[in-house]
Image: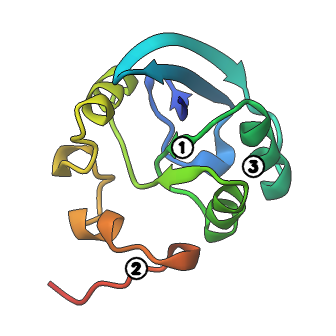
Amino acid sequence: MRIAIPTWSERVSPVFDEARTVLLVDIEDGRETSRLETSLSEAESAERAAKLAGLGVACLICGAISQELEARVSQVGIEVIPQVCGPVNEVLSAYLRGAIQEPNFAMPGCRHCCRNQRGRGGRWRGGRR
């Protein structure tokens, strides 16, 4: 399986729509087998989603993402895990151990419940806390 993490200064890029590089990580049997960083110059949502699909990405872990781009990426069959922040290596480690939803990886201002209850089109479906 291949995951993609947009990067900026060794951290998850805060806004995927504006990210210029993406780290591709191949995972087998729950372990990282290889990684490659590549440019992401496509500006249009459809082109950006198509590039990820062409790279064989199965899962995108990212910070903020527009509803349009999230829908496009989902439409090409890529799972999106949004609203994630932190150093790339720590985020990757958390993903591998099944702990990516921990509050310390949530973007500032995003409650933990937001990331679990987003519906189609990126709209939050939870109640007030």
> Which SS class for mark 1?
strand
Q: Which mark is residue 93?
A: none
Residue at left offset 58%, top offset 40%: 58
Q: Calculate the distance from the C-alpha at mark 2 to the C-alpha at mark 1.
A: 19 Å
Q: Earlier in the sequence, mark 2 or mark 3?
A: 3
Q: Which residue is mark 3?
A: 49
The image quadrant that residue 115 belongs to is: bottom left
Residue type at the position of mark 2: Trp
Residue, disc 1: 60
Q: Residue furthest top?
A: 34
At a point 46% along the width and 10% down the height, the residue shown is 33
Disc 1 residue type? Leu
Q: Nearer the viewer, mark 2 or mark 1?
A: 1
Q: Secondary structure at mark 3?
A: helix
The colour mode here is: rainbow
Query: Mark 1 touching mark 3, by CB under 8 A?
Result: no
